[in-house]
Image (tube, rainbow, N blue to C red):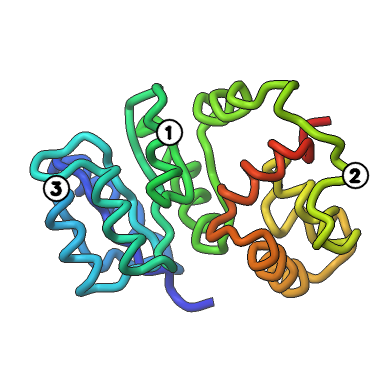
Amino acid sequence: MSEIRVMVVDDHPMLRFGISALVDAEPDMVVVGEASDGEEAVRLAAETRPDVILMDIVMPMMDGIAATQHIIEAQPDIAILILTVLDDDSVFDAMRAGARGYQSKVATGKETLRAIRAIAEGEAIFSPGAAYKLLRYFKPEQRVEASNAFPELTDRERAILDLIARGYPNSEIANRLKLSPKTVRNRVSIIFSKMRVKSRYEAMIEAQKAGLGLE
């Protein structure tokens, strides 16, 4: 795999420096830009076209949620990981804006690097607190009979979607279903197309609403 091109967005210089140093020390990653506010992030993303953006939420000029929305509208293939100290409902705003993950700034360097690699591969990453809020969002009365959900999907595609709804990455789905990683990636793209969703997060939300991944 080629180097993962990473952009770091945070209004605190020392934090930007620390994250950039962490990323640049990895042989499969390279920092292609740093921004201190949302407006600068939007401009820089268009210039550098990173694979992954690490995005703060609270910043001057334009916050991270608005910047995420602008960037994803222009470049939907960019994977944005929200890094924040907040533990509130901003996780929902971030996901609606198109972010692919939400992680605490107090996460270890190892956890942050794992998250970068995961979202670069198309996976969704959530901190424990964010994941708990997402699970609490779904009420039993919202569920329908899972076996009747998504009739446009094949049985194999529904099995993959069920594991997506449970939060499993593609690598684990491939292992559990005895499929190659490439086959899983292709099937996931087909599933998204049939469901008319643009991201793994949207697919997970719709699947859980339909009763998948909640047993």
- Picture quarter containing residue 11? top left
Amino acid type of the residue that numbered disc 1 sits on in the rendered structure = Val
In the picture of the structure, the residue carrying the numbered disc 2 is: 147
Closer to viewer: mark 1 or mark 2: 2
Closer to viewer: mark 1 or mark 3: 1
Foreground pick, 143 / 128: 143
Left or right of residue 34: residue 168 = right
Badge 3 element: loop
Residue 210: x %, y % from top left? 75, 39
Q: Furthest residue to the left? A: 61
Foreground pick, 27 / 106: 106
Q: Residue at x 35, y 56 (%)?
A: 23
In the picture of the structure, the residue carrying the numbered disc 1 is: 91
Position of residue 140 relative to residue 10, above or below, is: above
Quarter the N terminus occupies: bottom right
- Picture quarter containing residue 108? top left
